[in-house]
Structures are given as structure tokens and as C-alpha cells.
Image: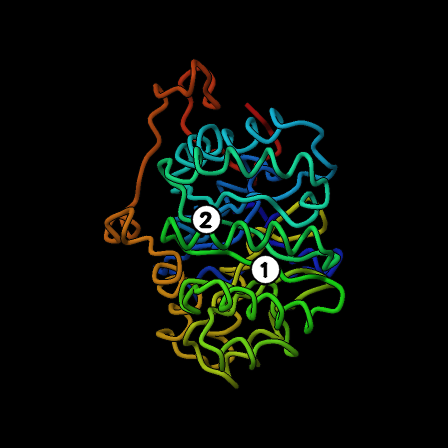
Amino acid sequence: MCTELNRDRSTMGNPMPLDLEAIKGMKFIDPHIHMVSRTTDDYQNLFDAGVSAVIEPAFWVGQPRTGLDTFKDYYSSLIGWERFRASQFGIRHFCTIGLNSREANNEPLAEQVMEILPHFLFKEGVLGIGEIGFDDQTVAEEKFYRAQLELAKESEVPVQVHTPHRDKTKGTTRSMDIALEHGLSAEAVIIDHNTEETVKEVLDRGFWAAFTIYPFTKMGNERMVEIVKQYGAERILINSAADWGISDPLAVPKTAALMLNHGISKADVEKVTFSNCIEAFRINDHLDINVLTQGTMADPNQKFEGNTILRGGQQPRIDHNTLIIS
């Protein structure tokens, strides 16, 4: 394993190695990870740490998209190239498709995006609609949040909800209120980016409570340990986001190891890092769950639209500990 990628980046250079022995033999799913922002090294390290599947919600890519074709290309990459790239490292890639809250404020473009969403929603590997919800909690954001909830209800798929960074408690409550107003069942909605201030209401109302383990903001994994100790493991999921900012793609296996080291049972750790995700996103409707516990090998001869990441027939494995790159 690469010692650099085993470092908890939230410590800014203070080593916190991933305890592979503690989680040996366990399998994980990261239910919210933006792999479009990660390198192939991250895929390899995820595989080595036991991550067998990832779910990538559609979101903004650092700056606003300016036309409908850029959305089409982005959604196509989630169900195409990114799915292929993950497979070359033994990881199964799923996604959710949606119009994110930041770009919902460009109403003329957002209206066009709503027209194409159904085209992508039933493609292979798409588990539902997400991530949608509120950012600045504007009228436009609510309009397109409601429209996508209606699409989810008609399509009978789960919804992955982004809760706002500012005024989070109000935004979280409003997100749940609106979902129920539209007739969605709480068990079909994953409320993400929870904190200590929101978790009780989310669980009490029957929604799935997802937590993003993220350096400096959202939720650290020591705090996450305390939340599981207090609330248990039912309807709780953890993820890394691993987006363009300062983030750690190994947050899920690291948190699993920390939970075990703090006396949380292996059964509960498996719930919040694997089986709850399967239930919340209905992965068993798309895949035989038994295959997630089986190792897979990449086929170096396989290509995606004539392209491959494995040049010259190489296998997806390199020695990070050697100084020589051969």
C-alpha cells in the first residue's frame, strides 16, 4: 500500500495509517464519492482497502456548466467511462443522476436539463436521482428539487439529498418536509451531509442518515464513532465525497477501522459501511449481492470506445514502495 495515500489528509502531514489488519477481509461500499475528481491511484487504493463498490452522485464540477451538451457529456461519463475505469481496478461503479442545487439557479438551462434526465435515469448502473436539494435555499432550488422528487416518485427510484452547508438544520428539515409533501416514503430518501445537529430528526422521521467524513468540515471520523455509539447503526451510512476540495477517498475504510478500535461491533460497522447502503439504494435490484464479496480482475484487452487505461496490456497493479518506476 502507498504510505502517502494511507495518510489522513485532515492531519495535514501528521501520519495516521490505515489499519489494514483491523479491517482485513471486510468489504465496503462508498455511497457518495466523486471519482471524476480522483486518479487511478485512488481506485487502486480503494480496492486494496476493501472497497468493492462506489456510488457517484452527479454534481457540479468546480464551475457552472454553460450549456445542455456539457450536462449530457457529464452524465454520459458517469454511466460510461467512469464505470469502465472503476472496473479496471476491480471496483463496481454505480451512480445517481440529477440536477444539482448549485446549477438549479440557472433556470433556463435547468429546464433543459430536466428534459433529458429521464433518458439517463434507467441506464445500467444508475441507482436513482441525486444529489439534489438545497444549497442557498433559493426559490429556484426548491422548484427543481420538487420536480426531481416527482420524477423519482414516478420512476420508483431512491433519492439522494444534498443538505446545505449554511443554515443546515433548517435546510435539512425543509428537505424532508418537501419529500413527504410529494408522497415519497422516508425510506426512499437518503439525507446526506448530516451532523450532530440534524441526525436525531432525520432518524426519528424514518429517513436514511448519511454522513460525509470530510477534513475540517461536515463530519470527522472520531465524531462519527460517537454518533454510532449514541444512535446505533440502523439507517446510518458513511461516505467520503472525495470531491475536488481537501478530501480523503479512504474515509470509509479508515472510519471502519476506527470504529472497531473504539469497541463498536463488527456487525454494526458492516451495517454503516456496507449493508445499509445496499438496502437504501436497492442495489440488490441491480446486482447479485454475492458478487460484491468476490474478487474481480480487470481484463487488459477490454476497451471503452477504443480506449484503455492499461497501456501495453499492463495489469492494474504497481509497486508504490519502489523508487524506480519501470
The residue sitting at 58% across, 37% down in the picture is 36
Question: Residue 17: which numbered mark, if any?
Answer: 1
Question: Residue 250: which numbered mark, if any?
Answer: none
Front-most of residues 9 and 116: 116
Front-most of residues 152 and 51: 152
Image: 218 above or below 225: above
Front-most of residues 11 and 220: 220
Of the 4 image quadrants, the one containing the C terminus is top right
Characterize the local packing of mark 1: few (<14), some (14-19) or many (20 or more) Cα atoms within 10 angstroms.
few
The kind of residue tagged 1 is: Pro
Is 86 on the left-hand or right-hand side of 63? left
The part of the image, by quadrant, that contains residue 69 is top right
The residue sitting at 54% across, 35% down in the picture is 40
Is 59 on the left-hand or right-hand side of 75? right
Question: Residue 151: which numbered mark, if any?
Answer: 2
Q: Position of residue 81 (x, y in %)?
A: 47, 28
Q: How many marks?
A: 2
